[in-house]
């Protein structure tokens, strides 16, 4: 059964499609991500992708966005433009015990190959689960993405796990 989800076709929970990109760099990234998709999907609740075109400074740029949600209620989002601009977000999704918390930034990924982006995304998904333990993954994300600039943080992590708060 086919259905539309975030602009990409999803066959079912087990078979998901990385959309076709027209630009060479995004095609290379899609191929690299596809080669790592099996272990990513194994550890994730869902993997969704969307290709879109957006205007930036009078230029039309292709963008590939990938959302990976884990079973631990975290989500990693990577938006990658054909000019190699990158936006990354790691979020703790709201649950009964947690409020939404999100870290996002625009890393400068000079020297990253398409394979390097795919590896960094895979590592980002792994490190996102630290949010479940009220631990910020920002220092590790900075190392993975070689990011020294600012990061936007929305929300607040619980100071300690809920089980300890009730005592």
Image: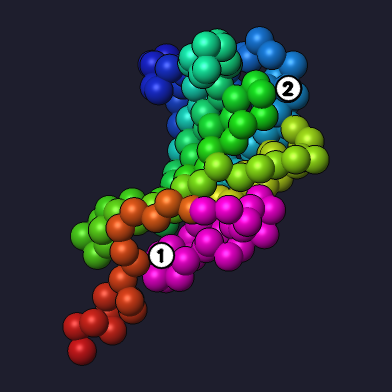
Query: Is 40 positioned to the left or the right of 92 in the image?
Result: right
Label 1: which secondary element: helix
Return the disc, 2 or 1, that comes first in the chain's sequence: 2
Q: Position of residue 138 (x, y in %)?
A: 53, 61
How many marks on residues? 2
User: Which residue is painted at 34% across and 66% down in the image?
Assistant: 157
Q: Give the structural element (helix, strand or loop) at label 2.
A: helix
Q: Position of residue 55 (x, y in %)?
A: 49, 14
| Magenta-colored stretch includes residue 102 | no
Q: Quadrant of residue 148?
A: bottom right
- Residue occupied by mark 1: 132
Q: In this rendered view, identify the residue nearer to me: 135 or 74.
A: 135
Determine the image quadrant of residue 126.
bottom right
**Residue occupied by mark 2:** 25
Start and end of the magenta stretch? 127-150
The residue positioned 48% from the left and 60% from the top of the image is 129
**The C terminus sits in image quarter:** bottom left
Q: Is residue 90 visible?
A: no
- Looking at the magenta stretch, what is its main secondary structure? helix
Q: Residue furthest bottom?
A: 167
Q: Nearer the viewer, residue 110 or 101?
A: 110
- Furthest toward the front, the residue is 57
140 within the magenta span: yes
Q: How is the image coloured?
A: rainbow
């Amino acid at each position: 059964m086919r259905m539309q989800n975030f602009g990409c076709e999803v066959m079912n929970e087990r078979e998901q499609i990385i959309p076709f990109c027209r630009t060479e760099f995004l095609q290379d990234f899609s191929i690299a991500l596809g080669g790592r998709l099996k272990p990513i999907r194994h550890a994730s609740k869902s993997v969704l992708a969307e290709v879109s075109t957006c205007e930036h400074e009078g230029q039309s740029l292709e963008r590939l966005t990938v959302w990976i949600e884990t079973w631990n209620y975290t989500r990693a989002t990577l938006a990658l433009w054909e000019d190699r601009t990158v936006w990354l977000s790691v979020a703790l999704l709201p649950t009964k015990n947690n409020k939404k918390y999100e870290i996002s930034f625009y890393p400068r990924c000079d020297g990253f190959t398409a394979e390097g982006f795919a590896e960094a995304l895979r590592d980002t998904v792994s490190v996102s689960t630290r949010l479940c333990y009220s631990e910020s993954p920002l220092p590790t994300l900075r190392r993975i993405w070689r990011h020294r600039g600012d990061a936007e943080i929305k929300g607040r992590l619980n100071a300690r796990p809920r089980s300890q708060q009730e005592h």
